[in-house]
Image (spheres, grey):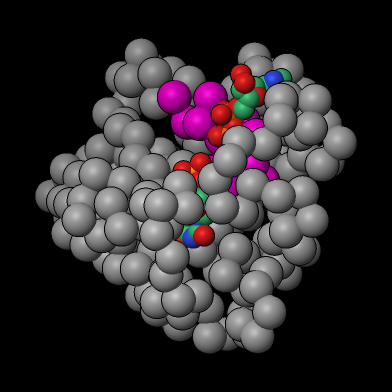
Amino acid sequence: MSCRRGALIVLEGVDKAGKTTQCKKLVQALKESGRPAEMMRFPDRTTKIGQLISAYLEKKSNLEDHTVHLLFSANRWELVPLMKEKLEQGISLVVDRYAFSGVAFTSAKPGFSLDWCMNPDVGLPKPDLVLFLQLHPAEAAQRGEFGTERYEVGDFQKIVMQKFELLMKDPSLNWQVIDAAKSIEDLHAEIKTHSETAITMAENQPIGELWK
Ligand code: ADP
Ligand code: 2DT
């Protein structure tokens, strides 16, 4: 490899765990320490597929459950060429939700196996680090009411959490569980340390393939 590649760092967690707050702070801190970094988020609502997903989440349209699952996956795949290009240029990507949200949310619906849900995302760029921001539902509730989007319902989120726990048992991924009840600054310090280690480890390794 002619230049050191960037790392793929994913932040996952339940709603209001602080994912977006921490992604932004991490990108800023990495840049300030001379490590190129950019933020991405899934779903990326700016593409044509993303707009279909956005209308579904906003309850402006209804989509069949299998169909919307495949659209979420397609929304990741359509960005893979760009992601690989950036990683190969040495830019680390800090990603707000990824395939793990995809699997956890759909498999929380009746009749969806974990295996079926994982299949469309097999082979995506493999994260070098997955930070799971763990927050008790009662703590999350203190951070404000749920919004009005689809899935922003307490009981559904509890099942989603159980599905995330199943995914976290996979030893082929570098999962780091973080206590998201800590202060924004304490969390940031912990996340930055894990990320710097992952960036150093990833530098001389090829980009992996998820769940392969
Ligand atoms: P997410 O992206 O996981 O849904 P956000 O980053 O949007 O979460 O944060 C949700 C809300 O909680 C925001 O109002 C944010 O300011 C607040 N928040 C984020 N992190 C913390 C924290 N560590 N402690 C207390 N409040 C937080
Ligand atoms: P936010 O934009 O507020 O993060 O909400 N979701 C996300 C899925 O059901 N499947 C997926 O593949 C992804 C990435 C989680 C987005 C909502 O969409 C859900 C919450």
**105 versus 31 height, above or below:** below
Residue 140 coordinates in the image, percent (x, y): 76, 34
Q: Was residue 22 drawn as part of the magenta stretch in this picture? A: yes
Residue 193 visible in the displayed image: no
* In-front residue for pair 56/127: 56
Q: Position of residue 112 (x, y in %)?
A: 61, 82
Image-quadrant location for residue 56: bottom left
Outermost residue on the right side: it is 138
- Against 138, residue 176 (above or below) is below
* Residue occupying image coordinates x 62% and y 65%: 104
Residue depicted at x 53% and y 85%: 116
Q: Which image quadrant shows ligand 1?
A: top right
In the image, is 100 to the left or to the right of 209?
A: right
Image location of residue 66, percent across then percent down:
46, 79
Boundaries of the magenta span: 8-24
Q: Residue at x 76, y 63 (%)?
A: 159
Residue 55 in view here: yes
Q: Is residue 158 left or right of residue 71?
A: right
Residue 28 x, y percent position in the rendering = 39, 18
Which residue is drawn at the image coordinates 35% and 68% (left, top)?
71
Magenta stretch holds residue 64: no
| Quarter of the view holding residue 175 | bottom right
- Res. 206 image quadrant: bottom left
